Image: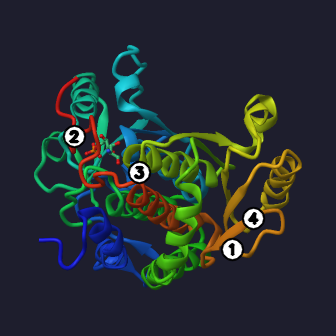
Amino acid sequence: DMGGHDTYMHKEISEQADAVDRVLRGRIDDRFSTVHLGGLNLDAREARGVRRVKILGCGTSYHAGLIGAQLIEELARIPADAEPASEFRYRNPVVDPDTLYVAVSQSGETYDVLAAVQELKRKGARVLGVVNVVGSAIARETDGGVYVHAGPEVCVVSTKCFTNTVVSFALLALHLGRIRDLSVADGKRIIEGLRKLPAQISEILATEDDIAKLAQEYAGAGSMMFIGRVRGYPVALEASLKLKEISYIHAEAYPASELKHGPLALIEPALPTVAIVPDDELLEKNRAALEEIKARSGPILAVAHAPQEKADHTIVVPKNETELDSILMGIPLQLLAYHTALALGRDIDKPRNLAKSVTVE
Ligand code: M6R
């Protein structure tokens, strides 16, 4: 049942305020400015003993894991990184007893992720899951974890699960942070930020008509470039994947800082760039990248907290706490991909060559 929407993708994009509300519900502990994650199965002593966090997932879940790693480093100050599960399991990884491994999967059935979990368990590692589907294979095989509570996602491309997975990582990071060195004041600040998310998501979704108009403008592009820096880079990766999957427009994502090391050669009037420009400590650096692109007559669409002078268009999103900004910046770009694919007459819920869950190698 699409509930009045033309596609599941549109329905699922539209459900994100409720979905985020659900992932937060019952988990916030105002007394200690932290969160309770009932199924984590990691006590405070064990949490303090974690020396590294390694996050494994595929596709969109890998991108959510990249943001998760940044959140864990920022809030809990534990070195963290994410890697495609498919790469990890084929490279005879060093498995370290002080590393906490986290497997991320919407379906909980992705074979490459499951195989990585099984290999890690076999070698005695502690593995948590960040999973949407309750009781799925990965949920069963991990030692504990966080359910993403996005509700069923039918469209082959992931939208609301991405957002809820990132919020789940924010909860995990806050929890680990408050057991370690995150202050009460910072814990409180992050909780306030999390509580603002559902209303801010609704604000973004209300601008859909404007985004649809922009999509008309970009639907003719043969290729698109997505750039971001630090918190913005995984957002660029995910937005580029979304566009590729449903519109079949070629897209690349680069850290804005890498432009001058090669991809700047591609910039010309026929290659639009979507730039993620949060109002954070890197704002001036990002603006300099926009200038570089403008100087080569590259069209620019910015996603930012205020209109950007060098951009042809800016999608303005509401500001949250800096650590949480990446959660919101991807949402208008889901709509951009959607309306671009719609303008091109694509089969949005069932893109060619793709399956909802990849249960084979
Ligand atoms: O169910 P999972 O999260 O494990 O799926 C992982 C990927 O196959 C999935 O995210 C894929 O990239 C989607 N088509 C993204 O829209």
Q: Which residue is mark 4?
A: 312
Quarter of the rendered image showing ligand 1: top left
| Dots 3, 1 in contact, CB < 8 A | no
Query: Secondary structure under badge 1?
Result: loop
Which quadrant of the view contains residue 183?
bottom right
- State the separation of the CA atoms marked 2 and 3: 36 Å
Disc 1 residue: CB within 8 Å of ligand 1: no
The answer for how far apart the CA atoms under marks 1 and 2 are is 35 Å
- The residue beneath circle 2 is 355
Q: In front: mark 3 or mark 1?
A: 1
Q: Secondary structure at mark 4?
A: loop
Q: Position of residue 246 (x, y in %)?
A: 37, 49
Q: How is the image coloured?
A: rainbow
* Residue count near mark 1 (Cα–Cα under 10 Å), binned few <14, some 14–19, many ≥20: many
Q: In the image, which disc is placed on residue 305?
A: 1
Dot placed on the residue nearer the N-terminal end, 3 or 1: 3
